[in-house]
């Protein structure tokens, strides 16, 4: 990393002295970005392994697809749940989805763990 670049970013950054977040947990914040709603409106107030979000009727990816013709791809950690019938992740309007749910004790496939096992079959994770 370029230390001078990092120092420049820190020097010219915006400082928030009185910031507010509706929930201090990542999953409700992700759901807010996805739906445009507050945690009290979208219903995701926390996260536990048992949480399984229903598909929201309107999401940013579905609106981008419907109104602007975008193709959307969700990548990374999401924690929006697994469809109990099919065993696949709830897509929330994304056309494509590659997720790492970061729950190593779950019985469902995890795209990142599958990739990791392909690259390093000799390493046990989890």
Image (cartoon, rainbow, N blue to C red):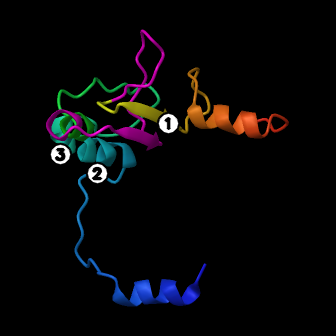
- Relative to 47, say whether 32 is above or below: below
Question: In the rendered image, which quarter is residue 50 located in?
Answer: top left
Secondary structure, mark 1, is strand
Q: Horizontally, is 85 left or right of 35 in the view? A: right
Q: Are marks 1 and 2 in contact (CB under 8 Å)?
A: no
| Residue at the image point whose x is 58% and y is 24% from the top | 109
- Relative to 28, say whether 124 is above or below: above
Going from N to C along the chain, the mark reached first, 2 or 3, is: 2
Q: Are marks 1 and 3 in contact (CB under 8 Å)?
A: no
Residue 86 highlighted magenta (yes or no): yes
Question: Which disc, if any, is residue 125?
Answer: none
Packing grade of label 1 (10 A; few <14, some 14-19, many >=20) is some
Residue marked by disc 1? 99
Q: Horizontally, is 5 left or right of 18 in the view? A: right
User: Quadrant where the N terminus lies?
Assistant: bottom right
Estimate the x, y position of residue 19 in percent, counting from the top left: 24, 69
């Amino acid at each position: 990393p370029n230390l001078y670049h990092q120092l420049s970013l820190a020097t010219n950054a915006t400082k928030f002295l009185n910031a507010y977040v509706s929930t201090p947990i990542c999953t409700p914040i992700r759901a807010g970005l996805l739906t445009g709603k507050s945690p009290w409106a979208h219903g995701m107030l926390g996260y536990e392994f048992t949480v399984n979000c229903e598909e929201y009727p309107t999401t940013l990816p579905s609106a981008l697809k419907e109104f602007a013709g975008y193709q959307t791809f969700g990548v990374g950690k999401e924690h929006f749940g697994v469809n109990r019938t099919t065993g696949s992740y709830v897509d929330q309007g994304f056309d494509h989805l590659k997720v790492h749910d970061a729950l190593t004790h779950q019985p469902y496939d995890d795209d990142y763990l599958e990739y990791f096992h392909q690259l390093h079959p000799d390493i046990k994770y989890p």
